[in-house]
Image (spheres, grey):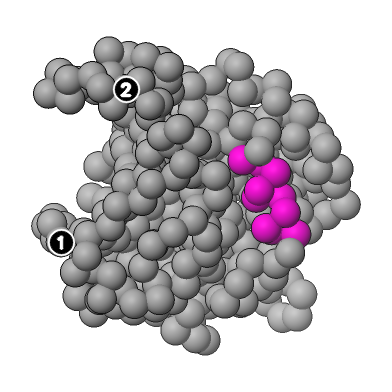
Amino acid sequence: MHISQRTFWLGAAIISGVVFLSLVVFLIVSMGAAGFAKEGDYDMKKAYEQREAEGVALELSVQDISEAAIDEKKEDILPKRSAKIRAVGDMMLDRTVYLHSLKADDFSFPFLNIADFLLDADLTIGNLEGAITDNTSIANGEGGQRFYFTFSPETVEPLTTYFDVVSFANNHAHNFGADGLAQSRGYLDGSGLAYFGDPNNDPNHLSVIVEKNDITFGFVGFHELVGFGFADVVAEVERLRPEVDVLIAYPHWGHEYITTHPSAAQKAEGHELIDVGVDIVIGAHPHVIQPIEIYKNKVIFYSLGNFIFDQYFSEETQQSLGIEILVQEVDPSFAKASEGKFEFTYKIYPIRVSEKSQPALAQEI
């Protein structure tokens, strides 16, 4: 797989309490209003369309470097621990997606055109929008049944092949009740696929800790669409923060099919998550791409859009983003005051979902 080396880059350093941003100038022109020129929100619809047409990825880096670090010899900088994460949006493996898999006699069918992207990472993460059960699928029926998703146990093998961590913090993981959720966890326990989050925001299932390349990652998920106490999420973040090197939140939030802006609740919750210690926020549920915000030198992806879904009724619901996050420990000899902290470099890939519910990097379709 060839990924173009033309990328969008943003560097941000905290020096004497001031955020400095450097930007590749020629891309300010090509990105226009979507360019990441300063802290704030960015219109990903324009960015998606530009990058889809050119077949290139966006790239930005965010790091926390002390003033004392600037005087060190930069040629001596050597990253210590590092890991590459790739994250995607909403995955639904029932209804028409299930029928395509049956026809192909292959439950890995939805993943085939994006396999290289998913496998080229140390950790791959996604939002699993449904339960894994032995129940018969009813989602191709009439009325409300179309929104009750159960995924065949045969999906466990491709999920464990292509993913390392999934979220159950969504409104469909409980479609088959407590038994369906218990079956889902049972199928994944021992499979090697970690999971976090709960459709009812059970405080006992909000998070998971995963070790990779000697880096301790914490994942926290919550479902905004049911009555829940955000204080429980904040408490879980505060509990996890001292136990992990990198903390990622995966909220299920916002309004469906709104591309132009996150809701007021998304903004407030996203900011508070950063305030209490989250490093990266990756949102799900709207089924479309929403803006990205840089807040206090951290990145909030309000919605990555559909990754695997059968919503073929609009361009927006067939557009998606894949995120690559390169996590690198800042060399203590360079950033003495930031010892143990990490630099995050992001690449943002445009993905298009076909009418067979197969995502692929947009430039490869």
**Residue kind at label 1, given as amino acid type:** Arg
Q: Residue furthest bottom?
A: 313
User: Marks 2 and 1, Cα distance to the nearest angstrom?
Assistant: 29 Å
Residue 302: tell me if it is visible. yes
Which disc, if any, is residue 6? Answer: 1
List x then y, in percent, for residue 144. Answer: 77, 75
Which disc, if any, is residue 69? Answer: 2
Earlier along the polypeptide chain: callout 2 or callout 1?
A: 1
Q: Judge whether residue 127 is colored magenta.
A: no
Q: Quadrant of residue 15?
A: top left
Which part of the image, by quadrant, shows the C terminus? bottom left
Magenta range: 265-274
Which part of the image, by quadrant, shows the N terminus? bottom left
- Judged left or right of residue 352, residue 364 is left
Q: Quadrant of residue 267?
A: bottom right
Q: Main secondary structure of the magenta part?
A: helix
Above or below, comparing residue 274 to residue 31 in the picture: above
- Judged left or right of residue 11, residue 337 is right
Which element type, helix, strand or loop, lies under badge 2? Answer: helix
Which element type, helix, strand or loop, lies under badge 1? Answer: loop
Which disc, if any, is residue 222? Answer: none
Above or below, comparing residue 327 to residue 45 in the picture: above
List x then y, in percent, for residue 121. Answer: 29, 39
Closer to the camera in the image, 25 or 225: 25
List x then y, in percent, for residue 190. Answer: 51, 24
